[in-house]
Amino acid sequence: MKEYTIEELAEYNGQNGKMYIAYQGQVYDVSDSYLWDGGTHQGLHDSGKDLTEEMDEAPHGPEIFKDFPVIGTLKK
């Protein structure tokens, strides 16, 4: 699996067609989700970012990520 830096992750913000997000060190591909239209989720969260801290404020838990493929890890 590829290891992404935070700068590399930022390139996958929906502007190039691909949308990746990170959570607890795992990088997920959310590109095929209609919930991430245009790189933004519900107008609250942007793709291309580590959402670990933002998940505390989400109305759902991290179990939501099981629906998306893990495509790499986030480099510390």
Image (cartoon, rainbow, N blue to C red):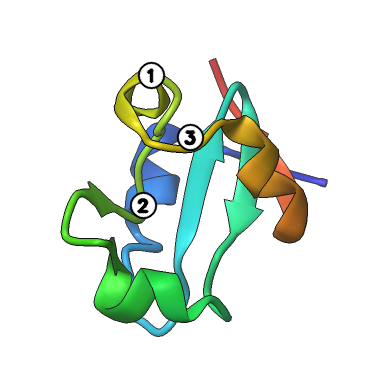
Q: Mark 1 points at which residue?
A: 56
Report the mark closest to the observer, 3 or 1. 1
- How crowded is the residue under tag 3: few (<14 C-alpha within 10 Å), some, or many (20+)? few
Upstream in the sequence, badge 3 or badge 2? 3
Q: Which mark is residue 34?
A: none
Q: Mark 3 points at which residue?
A: 5
Report the mark closest to the observer, 3 or 2. 2
Q: Residue at x 48, y 48 (%)?
A: 21
Left/right of residue 72 with respect to residue 58 in the rendered view:
right
Between marks 3 and 1, how big is the CA–CA gap? 23 Å
Q: Mark 2 points at which residue?
A: 48
Between marks 1 and 2, how big is the CA–CA gap? 18 Å
Q: Residue at x 38, y 19 (%)?
A: 56
The amino acid type of the residue labelled 2 equals: Gly
- Does 68 sit above or below residue 7? below
Q: Which residue is drawn at 48% across and 35% down?
A: 5
* Residue 10 image offset from top left, x and y in percent: 33, 50
* Residue 71 image offset from top left, x and y in percent: 73, 54
Upstream in the sequence, badge 1 or badge 2? 2
* Residue 1 image offset from top left, x and y in percent: 83, 46
* Residue 2 image offset from top left, x and y in percent: 73, 47
